[in-house]
Image: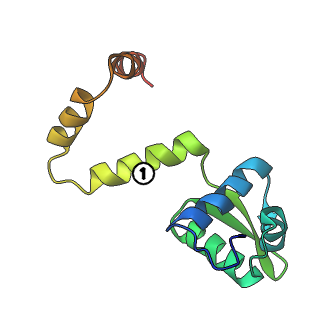
């Protein structure tokens, strides 16, 4: 069964698909370009809505082109993950405890990478 024939996407799945299209392209894309790349019968207005949401979240940038916009991903995948981690940390009152718990749960190899990054300034 195709996605448009009665099955629903998980929350955030369509945003992730649109973002993946923007990452793959590497250049600004119109909503029509994104819609064509997705190729699964999504309505143009749905694609515009998703792109607008990504822009409002700061995950995509947009630039006026005539009467519409072109969009591009604001960050690559690692940058987006880092942004999400920062958001979670910003929402916590006791940042030190959260960071300490995070570090204590790292694997030895991840802890080594983090130590190297901190030692070398990122």
Is 50 situated left or right of 119 in this image? right
Residue drawn 75% across and 81% down? 43
Which residue occupies the foreground of this view, 103 or 93? 103
Q: Is residue 42 above or below residue 60?
A: below
Q: Can the viewer see residue 26 in this picture? A: no
Q: Residues within 10 Å of mark 1 (few under 14, many from 20)?
A: few
User: Residue 97: which quarter of the image?
Assistant: top left
Q: How many marks?
A: 1
Say which residue appears at 42% left-offset and 22% top-offset. 121
Assign the N terminus to one quadrant of the image.
bottom right
Looking at the picture, does residue 90 appear above or below residue 116?
Answer: below
Q: Which residue appears at 60% of the width and 48% of the height?
A: 75
Looking at the rendering, in which quadrant would you find the C terminus? top left
SS category of the residue bearing label 1: helix
Left or right: 11 in relation to 96: right
Residue 6's spot in the image, x, y percent? 64, 79
Using the image, determine if residue 81 lies above or below residue 70: above
Task: Identify the image's colour scheme: rainbow, by chain, secondary structure or one colour.
Answer: rainbow
Q: Position of residue 3 (x, y in %)?
A: 68, 71
Where residue 92 appears, as percent x and y from the top left, is: 21, 53
| Residue 21 x, y percent position in the rendering | 73, 56
Rendered image quadrant of residue 117:
top left
Give me the residue at 82% from left, 83% from top. 67
Q: Which residue is mark 1?
A: 84
- Among the 4 quarters of the image, the one containing residue 2: bottom right
- Answer whether residue 65 is visible to the viewer in this image: yes
């Amino acid at each position: 069964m195709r996605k448009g024939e009665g099955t629903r996407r998980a929350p955030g799945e369509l945003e992730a698909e649109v973002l993946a299209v923007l990452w793959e392209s590497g250049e600004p894309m119109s909503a029509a370009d994104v819609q064509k790349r997705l190729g699964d019968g999504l309505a143009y207005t749905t694609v515009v809505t998703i792109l607008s949401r990504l822009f409002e979240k700061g995950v995509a940038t947009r630039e006026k082109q005539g009467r519409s916009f072109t969009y591009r991903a604001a960050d690559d995948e690692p940058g987006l993950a880092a942004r999400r981690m920062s958001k979670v940390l910003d929402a916590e009152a006791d940042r030190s405890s959260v960071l300490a718990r995070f570090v204590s749960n790292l694997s030895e190899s991840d802890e080594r990478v983090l130590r190297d990054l901190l030692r070398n300034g990122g």
